[in-house]
Amino acid sequence: MSLISIVITLIVVGVLLWLVNAYIPMDAKIKKILNIVVVICVVVWLLSAFGVINHSGDIRVPQVHS
């Protein structure tokens, strides 16, 4: 996945989240939960996109050779 597509996706997700927060009337607690869920999903997606975690959820830790 190219860096440009990652940046565009982050911009689109941010704009959509802003639109939901600004124009859809919801209780503040629900908005807070929605924001937390979206942020967690984006962080997990970014970790997967950069190869830190794979699709099965295993975390790859680099090995240091001495």
Image: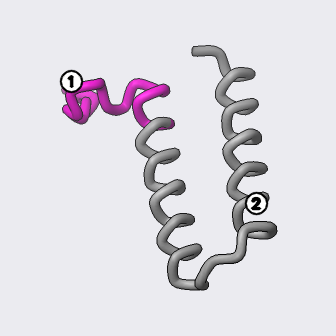
Q: Mark 2 is on which residue type?
A: Trp
Q: Position of residue 61 (x, y in %)?
A: 25, 33
Q: Position of residue 37 (x, y in %)?
A: 46, 59
Q: Mark 1 is on which residue type?
A: His
Residue 2 drawn above or below residue 34:
above
Residue at horizontal 64 percent and vertical 15 percent from the top: 2
Residue at horizontal 78 percent and vertical 50 percent from the top: 15
| Magenta stretch encompasses residue 54 | yes
Residue at horizontal 68 percent and vertical 33 percent from the top: 9
Horizontally, residue 36 falls left or right of residue 52, namely: right
Horizontally, residue 16 falls left or right of residue 54, namely: right
Rendered-image quadrant of the C terminus: top left
User: Callout 1 environment at 10 Å: few (<14), some (14 to 19), or many (20+)?
Assistant: few
Location of residue 22 (image quadrant): bottom right
| Residue named by callout 1 | 65
Q: Main secondary structure of the magenta part?
A: loop
In magenta, the rendered stretch is 46-66
Rendered-image quadrant of the N terminus: top right
Horizontally, residue 23 falls left or right of residue 43, namely: right
Secondary element type, mark 1:
loop
Q: Position of residue 24 (x, y in %)?
A: 72, 68
Q: Position of residue 12 (x, y in %)?
A: 74, 39
| Residue named by callout 2 | 18
Residue 38 drawn above or below residue 1:
below
- Depth check, front residue: 32 or 8: 32
